[in-house]
Structures are given as C-alpha cells and as structure tokens.
Image: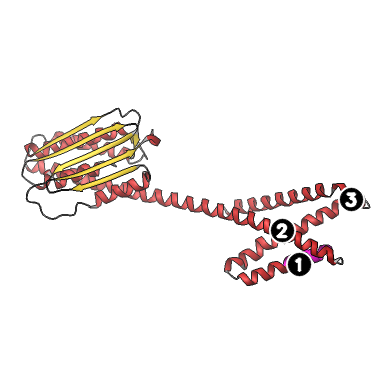
Amino acid sequence: MFKKSVCNTILLNLGAFLLVAMLEILGGWLFRDKYDTPYSFYVWQLSYALTIMGVIWVNHFILIPFVYDKKRYLSYSILLIATIFLGAFLKAYPEWIGVYKMSSFLIYTTGTGMAAFFLRRNLIIQRENAEKEKLQRAIELNYLKEQVNPHFLFNALNSIYSLARQQSPETPDLVMQLSELMRYQLESSKKNTVLLKEELEFIENYLLLEEKRLSDRSTIEFLIKGDVLQLRIAPMLLIPFVENAVKHGAQSTNEQSAIDISVAIKNSTLHFCVINSKPAMVTVANREGMGLENVRRRLKLLYPNSHLLEISDSEKEYRVDVSIDLSDSK
C-alpha cells in the first residue's frame, strides 16, 4: 500500500511537471525567435517550469508536512515567502523587475498548487475514513449477528427442555424441527441478505415450535399480506421481536395469552407488526434487553435512512411496529 502511494505521488508530480512545461513552451512559442537557438528556447522554458514546480515541491513535501501541519503557521508563512523569493531571485536576477514579476507569478502558481494539494489530501482522508467506517461497520454487524445465534439457540433449547420435562411425545419431532431451524440459521449467518420468503418461513417454523410447547395457553396468529417477490432482508433481523413477544407474553404467565404477528408488503416496503398480550400480574422487567437492543443497532447500521421502529407498551399489550424499505435489497 505504501509503495503504491509513493508511485502514485511520483507519477502525479511528474505529470504536473510535464503539464507546466508544455504550457510554458506553448505560452512562449510566439517569442521563440528572440532566442539564439531553439535549444536555448526549450532550456529556458523547461528551467522556468522547473522553478515553478521546485517551489511547489518544497512547499508540498517540506513546508506543509514539517511546519504547517505542526501548526507553526507564522514560521510556515515566513519560510514560504522566502522560498518564493529565492526561486524568483535564482531565475530572474540581476533584473530586479524580473524578480518582482517572477515572485508574483510564483505566488499565484504556489497558491494554485496548494489548493490542488489540500483538495487531493482531503479526498484521500475522506476515502480512508469511509473505508475505516465501512470496516468498522462490517465488524460491528458481524458481532451483532453472532450475538443473535447463541441468544436464539438458548431460547429454542429452553423450549425443547420444557417439553422434555413434560415427557411430551412430540419432543423427538420438535428436536428435528429445531435442527432444521438451526441449519437455516447457520447457513443464513454466512450471508449478508436472504430471501424475505425464507426468513418468514423460518419465523413461522419457530412459532409452530413455540405453539406446541405452550399448548393451549397461548393463541398465536401469523398473517402475511402482499407478494414478497424477490425481496431480500438481513438474516435473523426480525426474530428477536418474535422471541421477545413469547418470552414476555405467553412464557411469563400461566394465563391465557395471545400473540399476533402481521406482515404486509407494499411497494417493496416491509411492514412487520408484533403484538403480545401482557399478563395481569407481571413482574417489572426490562423489555429492552440484549435482543431488542441488538436489532435496534442492526437496523441503524443496515437501513440507516430507510426504516422506522415504533414500540409501545400499554397496560394490556406490548406492540412493535417495524417498517423497512427493501427496494435496494432485491
């Protein structure tokens, strides 16, 4: 990376020198007859271009990094003026009027060079910051995604354990169902996005497992409206809302409870709503646990300007409404 940067800098400055030399030659072409020979004309123009670029190079590679960037602005101004005057003096002396004109011209070219230098440096800094932000975002997303896996597995195993203790004859079938859920989970964790249809099927299978465990204590409704088409979504993004509804609704009471989940797709926008009833006697608990905090952060990272999350907690029910624009995920 360092060698590539050095090569790019050398090529850029070589190209700048050739451009300035070409402009000087073209600019003085009408006056070439004033020189003794064509050779002397080209030598003069090239030396003129070298003086211009010499002052610019001293400024770019010595004064700016070693003086200006260390916030020694007064010293930088003095040294820059001295460099410009020295360049003009070496080129135009002993004609002082020529030194004055050359100094004025070098001030202009050096200022133009500084503008180009700082513009290029800012673009490089912005690109590096964008790459760092992208890398940090990928690292954080992977971390959040990996958090979902053990969290979901822990909840699912608790469901199987509860049925096993009841010596339910459906336990072996549910173990197989869980294995299918885990297979999908492991496969989807390797992808950035999955088909929305597959993700909804995963949620449906999870609800079937929970419905069997909860037996007659809970009524679970899962309704899908609209055509999912080829829409894609980040894997395991919606399941924390469903787990949260089971954990803090039906699972927290022996009373009759209800979980209503609705999915609607309109113009490539997913509307996902989860409502669970709350038991009459409930202990104070933090509903904003790891699962919800995780998905809230993932939504901000994955869909920063294309999602809406609303959570309402009333006396009788807990409701989550999520809207995600999936038009860029087809």
Give the SS element for disc 2.
helix
The amino acid marked with disc number 1 is Phe
Residue 143 drawn at (x, y percent): 34, 50
Secondary structure mostly seen in the magenta stretch: helix
Highlighted magenta segment, given as a residue range: 83-92
Which mark is in front, 1 or 2? 2
Which mark is in front, 2 or 3? 2
93 in the magenta segment: no
Mark 2 to mark 3: distance in Å?
A: 28 Å
Which residue carries the number 1 mark?
Answer: 85
Name the residue located 25 percent from the left edge and 38 percent from the top edge.
272
Few, some or many residues within 10 Å of mark 1 (<14, 14–19, 20+):
many
Give the total of numbered labels. Answer: 3
Q: Which label number is shown at residue 108?
A: 2
Residue 144 drawn at (x, y percent): 32, 49
Would you identify the image quadrant in which residue 86 lies?
A: bottom right
87 in the magenta segment: yes
Is any atom of residue 186 visible in this view?
yes
Position of the C terminus, as image quadrant, is top left
Which residue carries the number 3 mark?
Answer: 39
Q: Closer to the N terminus: mark 1 or mark 2? A: 1
Mark 1 to mark 2: distance in Å?
A: 13 Å
Is any atom of residue 171 visible in this view?
no
Residue 189 drawn at (x, y percent): 32, 41
42 to the left or right of 271? right
Which mark is in front, 1 or 3? 1
Q: Closer to the N terminus: mark 2 or mark 3? A: 3
